[in-house]
Image (cartoon, rainbow, N blue to C red):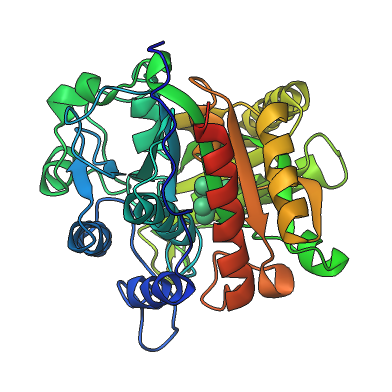
Amino acid sequence: MSQPVAHRRTAQPAIDAERLLRRVEELGRIGRDPVTGGITREGFSRADREARTYVMRESRAAGLATSVDAAGNLMIRTRPPGTAPARPAVLMGSHLDTVVNGGRLDGAYGVLAALEVVQACAESGIETAYEPVAAAFSNEEGALFPQPFFGSSVLAGRLDGLPREPLDHDGHPLRGPLALAGGDLDALGSAVWPAEALAAYLELHVEQGPVLERARNRIGVVDGITGRTVLTLEISGSAGHCGTAPMPGRRDALAAAARATLAVERLATTLDLCRVATVGRLDIHPNSPNTIADTVRLTADLRDTDAARMHRAETVLTRELQDLAHQTGTRIETLARTHSAPVATSARLRALIEESCRETGAPYQSLPSGAGHDAQVVADLTPTAMIFVPSVGGVSHVPHEDTHPADLVLGAEILLRTALKTASG
Ligand code: HGY
Ligand code: MN
Ligand code: MN
Ligand code: MN
């Protein structure tokens, strides 16, 4: 690791609250449904590209240097790479893509706060041992192309787990949309960071749950991030006329999918094998009111902070699906499987976050993250930590996802202070 650059301080970097809140609102208009108010910016969609362009434009207007790597990750620096001695980065970021009909803060807030920190450092002229860099990781949610954590996985060098030709849910290739976002599927290797290029990763995010609000704490210091396994299952049966096909002998893929959905739910209820288990997406063919469905695809999302529990839950589900296929005369296949291990965050970085909270008098607490984050992927390379701010009503992935403006500003302040403490080497 290169020797830290001398630490020259001029004015103290400061968060510009009005600028941050303005950007949150402006970015929140991109991909917004005028009827539901929900945000839909699936990774590598047109709306996602518009969001990346908005953040790039704001960064350049602020005199910052932007670049998009082969995975479509947007990086924002105080000055272009190569114009100063190379230093390990204190990387801060999150994602700009959303779930379908989601909220305006999940991911976007963390990217804009990271931009705010880098801009505050540039405006102050501060020179730190490590370089503050902001990142918008591509396709964190996997809403259209079911390869969640795509951008952070490439940065972390997790290329083996990616399909050669990633496809979206309807079989359309990623290659074109990735190129439109500034990426290059054939050059993903160029977007991999070596561990020594990083000193730390910090992610500021809305909690997306009820814990902080209920406890009346304003900052969450995340101690662990949940593990997550997502199975894409395909159930194949036989189509037929629903009025003439006798009940005995049917191979009804949708009836089997309904039983599979309940089997997934049971993993986290009566069987208590993992913390949560959800079927969130169902694609039915031919999806016709008077036709027996012949094919159903569904996603099973299993989560726990204990890897062994998650593994056991998946094993039990696999066996139950085999039994179900036999009972219903259908074929049940796993088309795809993505897995992120649970991770513990860095105790050293957590202590710096807590120190920043004490300096500001912000009431804080430790808590686990039930949501998955890019931080658990970047943890492969470098110490990572997450800072949460409260979610109003404890909800997220819905149009009414919200956080009080004062909490949004406080979160950015804590991110800035923690980043400066980390960057000072
Ligand atoms: O699903 C999650 O936990 C996150 O929103 N990607
Ligand atoms: Mn999300
Ligand atoms: Mn998120
Ligand atoms: Mn995240």
Q: Position of residue 207 (x, y in %)?
A: 66, 57
Q: In which quarter of the image is residue 133?
A: top left
Q: In this view, does 416 lie to the left or right of 218?
A: left
Q: Residue at x 51, y 60 (%)?
A: 106
Q: Position of residue 76 (x, y in %)?
A: 29, 46
Foreground residue among 362 and 333? 362
Residue 123 falls in which quadrant of the image? bottom left
Q: In which quarter of the image is the N terminus?
A: top left
Report whether 64 appears left or right of 374.
Answer: left
Camera sees residue 366: yes
Where does the image place residue 410, in percent across and percent down from the top left?
62, 64
Kindly give the residue lying farthest to the top in the view shown: 1
Query: Is residue 399 placed above or below 345 in the rendered structure?
Result: below
At 69% from the left edge and 28% from the top edge, which residue is drawn? 348
Quarter of the figure with residue 393: bottom right
- Look at the picture and state if 374 lies above or below 212: above
Q: Is residue 184 above or below residue 297?
A: above
Q: Is residue 344 visible?
A: no
Q: State the residue in front, 383 or 337.
A: 383
Above or below residue 173? Residue 101 is below
- Relative to 24, is 29 on the left or the right? left
Q: Residue at the spot x=68%, y=44% of the render?
A: 353
The residue lying at 45 percent from left, 75 percent from top is 21
